[in-house]
Image: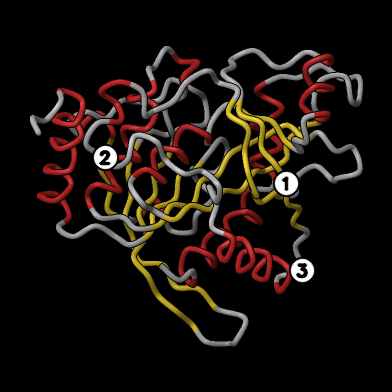
Amino acid sequence: MKMTKYKDKVQQSVDFLTKWHGNAPEIAIVLGSGLSDAIPKIQEMKTVHYNEIPGFKNSTVQGHSGDLRIGTVTASLSSGNQKTREIAFLRGRNHAYEGNDPGEVVHNLRSLITWGVKGIILTNAAGCLNTEWELGKMMILTDHINATGMSPLNGEYGIGFGAQFVDMTESYDKKWQSQIKEIAHSSNHIIYDGVYYGVLGAHYETPAEIRMFKTLGASAVGMSTVLETIAARQLGAKVAALSCLTNYGAGLKHVQLSHSEVMDMGTRFASDMANIVLKAAVSLEI
């Protein structure tokens, strides 16, 4: 089958990454808003900026640094043993609300998986729809609702990466969910679980929309993650996703929402989330 222009662009990224680093790490982490600088010693890791990688685009959003870093991470496990694994970190992502098409939204992640990454941990900042939950805590995604009106499998964006009609019954690996919850509890961190409602953005939701999302069974809402998950599952990669609950949805607490406040909350609790994410990345079974 002839390679599409889109797949050719992904292959150009893969060729660059292979020449730059050799074999791909097993695990990659996408660092969402406020998390880019929370990983210990990340500034010392091997780095390439998105604008140096063919096909990659820089994010235009505050809090998304726009580089790929690779380093060896050591974590202490609940057993008392230490384990080490090489991890790739995507510091920042591309969003559809920036004007990106679905292929551009998932290009960076899709390139890493095509390169050889086997497992993905997605992180994001999200609005909390459960007023009994505490802000600043994490929610592990058990499922999602894609309300973006987009799919990274439509047209040429999905050709050559796997089945066009991808089974999404288990979008997020259940075993990984259990392991991450165990890691959080062993570190005395509160972690919730629930359904993530993915919207296009960039505006925040209305109170009426928030009421609808809750009625549909969602526990958090955000503007990322769902398209990346679909693309990763098409390629056969395992996926786990964590939301930092930075604010309550519109109308739930009668306060105005702003991106700066979301960033501030994400930054305040980033170290807690990073601790869980790193332990998970080192210990999860591929």
Residue 161's label in the rendered image is 2
Nearer-the-camera pick, 268 or 253: 253
- How far, Cα to Cα, is label 1 from label 2? 29 Å
Q: Nearer the viewer, residue 140 or 64?
A: 140
Q: Is residue 67 above or below residue 178?
A: above
Task: Give the camera-side residue of 38 and 208.
Answer: 208
Q: Amino acid at mark 2?
A: Phe
Task: Please state which of the two labelled residues, at mark 1 or mark 3, is closer to the viewer.
Answer: 1
Q: Quick one: SS at disc 2?
A: loop
Identify which residue is drawn at 71% across, 19% down: 258
- What residue do we see at 44% from left, 56% from top? 238
Neighbor class of circle 1 (other Cα within 10 Å; few <14, some 14-19, many 20+) is: some
Residue 188 marker: 3
Residue drawn at (28%, 33%), measured in percent from left and top? 50
Q: Which residue is mark 1?
A: 194
Mark closest to the chain's N terminus, 1 or 2: 2
